[in-house]
Image (cartoon, rainbow, N blue to C red):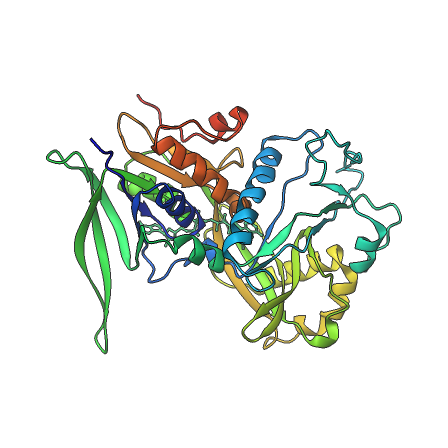
Amino acid sequence: MEADKRCIVIGAGIAGAASARALADRGWQVKVLDIAPEPCAAASGVPVGVVSCHASPDDNLLSQLTRAGMQCTLAFARQHLTEGKDWYSSGVLERRFADAEHPKKPWQTPNPDSVWFSHVQLAQPEQLNAAGLSSEGSQDLWQPNGAWIKPMALVRALLSHDNIHFMGLHEVENMQKSAATGEWQLRIKHHISIPSMGSSHTYTSESAPQIVLATGAQTPDFLNQVLYEPDMGLHPISGQVSWGMQPAALDTLLPPFAVNGHGSFVAHVPTSEGKTWYIGATFDRHQASTTISQEAHRHNHQRLTQLLPQAAQALESQWHNDSELHAWVGVRCASVNRLPKVGPLNTQRWPGVHMLSALGSRGLTTALLCAQHLANGIEGRATDLPEALVKPMACVLDNA
Ligand SMILES: Cc1cc2nc3c(=O)[nH]c(=O)nc-3n(C[C@H](O)[C@H](O)[C@H](O)COP(=O)(O)OP(=O)(O)OC[C@H]3O[C@@H](n4cnc5c(N)ncnc54)[C@H](O)[C@@H]3O)c2cc1C
C-alpha cells in the first residue's frame, strides 16, 4: 500500500515554509495554515537578514549548525532567487570587540584541513578599509560566503510548489486525533472580513495524518493552551531594526558587505523605492512586544556608532529626523540551549506531530537545514545532521 503523504504545517514563516518545501519536494501534499492573510506575518517578515556562521575557535554546536545551515540556505537562494535583488553574497565582516572583561581568543588563520578553511578568515586590510576601519590591532573576521537575504522572497520561493497549498486567516485552535480515521483533526478559526461590516469568523476543520508545528514565538502558548504540554523552556526575544533610505551620495561611505558584531548592519539593499540600509536588532529577552520604541532606536544608533563609526557619521542626520528613520519589530522564539527544536513531539501522546521552532536569531541561516532533518524523520529516513546536534535539538516532552 502506498504511504499516505499528507501533512498540515501550522505557521507560514521560514520554519513552516521550509518544512512544507522539504516535504513537497519528496512528493507530499502539504497545506500550510496561518492566522495572518499572507505568509511572513511575524518574525520572518524582517525586511532583510544576514546569513552567516557563528565562528567559535572550539567549533561549538551552534557553529556546526550555522556553517551547514548557511550552505543549505544559499544553495536554495542561488537556484530560486535573484541575486542582487532578493539576496546578495556580499561576504560578511565580523567585528570582534574585546575588553579586559571579555577577552577574545585569537583567531588562527585556518589550515586547509580546518573546518573553518574557506569559511572564516582574519579580515584583510582591504575589507577593513572598505568599512572605514583601521587594520591596526584588528581581530575582526571575514566570512567570504556570508550574504544578506530578504526573508519574504525566500519564503515566497519556498512555498511556490505545486504540492503546497497556503491557507491564510486560518488559526488552529485545537487538535484531536479522530478515532474513526486515526488522523489529526484541527479545529480552525477561519477569520473573514466582510466589507463595510468589519471582521468576523467561522469554524472549519482540516485533517491529516502528519502535523508540523512551526508557530514561532507563539509556540510556548500553542504547547500550553492547545496541547496542554509544558513549554520546553521556549521564550520570546523581541527585536527592533532601525532602517532608512540610502541617498546615492552615501554609496561609497557605507560598506559594500554586511557587518556583524554589535548587531548587524546591511546597506545597498534595493527596494521598489530605492536603496536602503538597516541596523539591528535589539535583543529583549522574555519580551514579546511588537511596539516600536525610541529607546530601541537609540540603542541601535549607539551600536552603529561602535560597529562602524564612518557609516554612523554618514547617516547621522537621518537619526534625528523622524520622517527619515523607520523601524521594524518582530519576536524571535529561543530555547534554553540556543539551538532550534526540531523533530517529533512525543511519539506516544502525539504520534505524527512534529515541530520546527526556536530558530532564535539565526532562523534564516538554519531553517532549511533543520527542515531537511524534520522531513527525513517524518519519512523514517536517516538524518544528514551531525550526530552531536540531533539530541540537543530534539523536542523533549517526557513520556511520563
Ligand atoms: C528583528 C529580527 C532580526 C533578525 N535577523 C536575523 C538575521 O539577520 N539572520 C537570521 O538568520 N535570522 C534573523 N532573525 C531570526 C529569524 O527571523 C527567525 O528565526 C525566523 O524568522 C523564525 O521563523 P519561524 O517560522 O519560526 O517564526 P515566524 O516567522 O514568527 O512564523 C510563525 C508563524 O506562525 C503563525 N502562527 C502562530 N500560531 C498559529 C496558529 N495557532 N495557527 C496558525 N498560524 C499560527 C504566525 O502567524 C506566524 O506567521 C531575526 C529575527 C528578528 C525578530
Whether residue 272 sits left or right of residue 305 in the image: it is: left
Whether residue 278 sits left or right of residue 136 in the image: it is: left
Along the viewing direction, whichever of 24 and 369 lies nearer the viewer: 24
Q: Quadrant of the C terminus?
A: top left
Extreme top residue here? Answer: 400
* Residue at the image position 73 percent from the left and 29 percent from the top: 113
* Residue at the image position 40 percent from the left and 43 percent from the top: 22
Q: Is residue 246 visible?
A: yes
Extreme front residue here? Answer: 1
Whether residue 273 sits left or right of residue 100 in the image: it is: left
Task: Give the answer, above or below, for where 188 lies relative to 391.
Answer: below
Quarter holding residue 396: top left
Quarter holding residue 245: bottom right
Extreme left residue here? Answer: 180
Task: Give the answer, above or below, for where 64 lies relative to 334.
Answer: above
Along the viewing direction, whichever of 84 and 361 lies nearer the viewer: 84
Task: Give the answer, above or below, for where 58 lies relative to 139.
Answer: above
Q: Position of residue 228 (x, y in %)?
A: 28, 36
Task: Give the answer, above or below, for where 158 lies relative to 274.
Answer: above
Q: Position of residue 97 (x, y in %)?
A: 76, 45
Q: Quadrant of the N terminus?
A: top left
Whether residue 334 sits left or right of residue 145 in the image: it is: left
* Residue at the image position 32 percent from the left and 28 percent from the top: 346
* Residue at the image position 64 percent from the left and 40 percent from the top: 54
Q: Position of residue 58 (x, y in %)?
A: 69, 29
Q: Position of residue 368 (x, y in %)?
A: 48, 44
